[in-house]
Amino acid sequence: MSSTDVLIGIDAGTSVIKSVAFDLKGRQIAVASIRNQYQSDADGAATQDMERTWQDCARSLRALAEEVPGLAERTLGISVTAQGDGTWLVGKDNQPVTDAWLWLDARSAPTVRDLNKSENSRARFESTGTGLNSCQQGSQLAHMSRYAPELLKATDCALHCKDWLYLNLTGVRATDPSEASFTFGDFRTRQYSDLVIDALELSAYRSLLPDIIDGSDITHPLSVTASRLTGLKAGTPVTLAYVDMVMTALGAGVHTGMDNAACSVIGSTGVHMRSVEAENVYLNSEGTGYVIALPVRNRVTQVQTNMAATLNLDWLLNIAEDILSSEGLASSHNSLVSNVDQWLQQSQPGQLLYHPYISAAGERGPFVDAQARASFIGLSYRHRFHDLVRAVVEGLGMAVRDCYQAMGPIPQELRLTGGAARSVELRSILAACVGAPVRISSRLEAGAAGAAMMSAVANGVYQSMEDCIADWVTPLLGDKECADEHLVNRYTQLYEAYVETRTSLARIWEKFS
């Protein structure tokens, strides 16, 4: 056994920070998780304590060492990815200027509306491939420049979450090509664009943007200070990975050498990604979605995201739990989830239409409407609870198809990850809604794995990312699960009604605002 036979992937999400140990062939050894916290306010603010986030990251690494004997001496490399978008400002001596503005923060919405009306809006979209919304650092910095300029005056560098953790691990201010290009640049060059920065009205603050480094090629050593806090060996190479969405997609199989493969993460939110060559990107007329670089030459992911995926099912099951509780019947959310496949089997396909816009923030993919709201269409006296469950799951499938339709051709194959992908019935519904076979990955921690894969390439374990994918990803993909032809036909009809009604409902949603 080599003395350095472990790679560590850090995945710092909004609510959980995970540090995961892998062997050099991609087998997961151990994971340590630390709950993270954020604050939200009535004005739309969603913020996170930057110093605590770093301390929690260090705690997760120390906890991992308790699970893996000799971790410090065995670690060949460390890599870090994290929640995307948001704004993490640092000033003098690399200290936080204020609490981080998260991707959940909605305060910049008025500024987004103004910027989207500007004459440079379409040119900005065609450069970044990304529709502007309040999640992004570009819109948040533009909002700060208008309404809180004192924050930017105190700032030396504007970072994202993973960049902040990398700074604390290495002492280096930097960002990666993925977030840099979809926020401030051009996905074709993976560099900053003056056109985009001008369109965001941020030319005066260009100096706040950090250098762009590709963690597949460039690493920096773990600092002595970080070594003391994490328990890992000073000098260990640290990789700045790409943003968590594409790291998760990479680890789950979005790119295995097949053109127009896709990956959907079916969690609380829905993230839908297709892998394409940069020159084949489809830019929709609505100006929505993201284009995010992969750590593969000339390869990008097109991305559309739903504000709420399984949150819709959680809402329905919470109602059931409330009713049972009011009758003195003990139940739990997990026990109700275990019945979902049974309820789906009891119901008939395509009897109801459900629009899964349950989030109080509305929808952002494939259209942006903060007033969008969920609804059932077609209810009658004969419908029962299991029919509502099927309608909600079918609504999730319709939303997945809606997102892929906005990105060009329907994918040839859909890889699924996220807790909901464990449901056989749900997978069959998604396959039929999209009209493509599905495969699931047995990879447990796809985001951390994607980050560790970049470390594996950077540290010479593999000569290329394609070689790494062949060992770390492809063998973990399950067999194809083909869509039922009759179900595909039924859902194709339902999808037409789904799009027509969601378009018509927009003027109704306005009346609720």
Image (tube, rainbow, N blue to C red):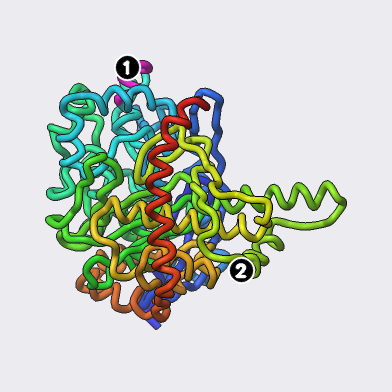
Q: Quadrant of residue 276?
A: bottom left
Q: Is residue 463 above or below residue 242?
A: below
Q: Please say whether residue 491 is one of the residues in the magenta stretch.
A: no
Q: What stretch is highlighted in magenta?
A: 142-149
Give the Cα separation between the discs numbered 2 and 1. 50 Å
In percent of width and height, residue 377 lies at: 53, 47
Three-letter residue code for mark 1: Arg
How many numbered marks are there? Answer: 2
Tell me if I can see residue 168 in this picture.
no
Q: Please say whether residue 148 is one of the residues in the magenta stretch.
A: yes
Quarter in which the N terminus is drawn: bottom left
Q: Residue furthest front?
A: 381
Q: Which of 354 and 169 is in front in this view?
A: 354
Q: Residue furthest right?
A: 328
Does dot 1 land on a helix, a strand or a loop? helix
Dominant SS type (magenta): helix
Disc 2 packing (10 Å; few <14; some 14–19; many ≥20): some
Tell me if I can see residue 35 in this picture.
yes
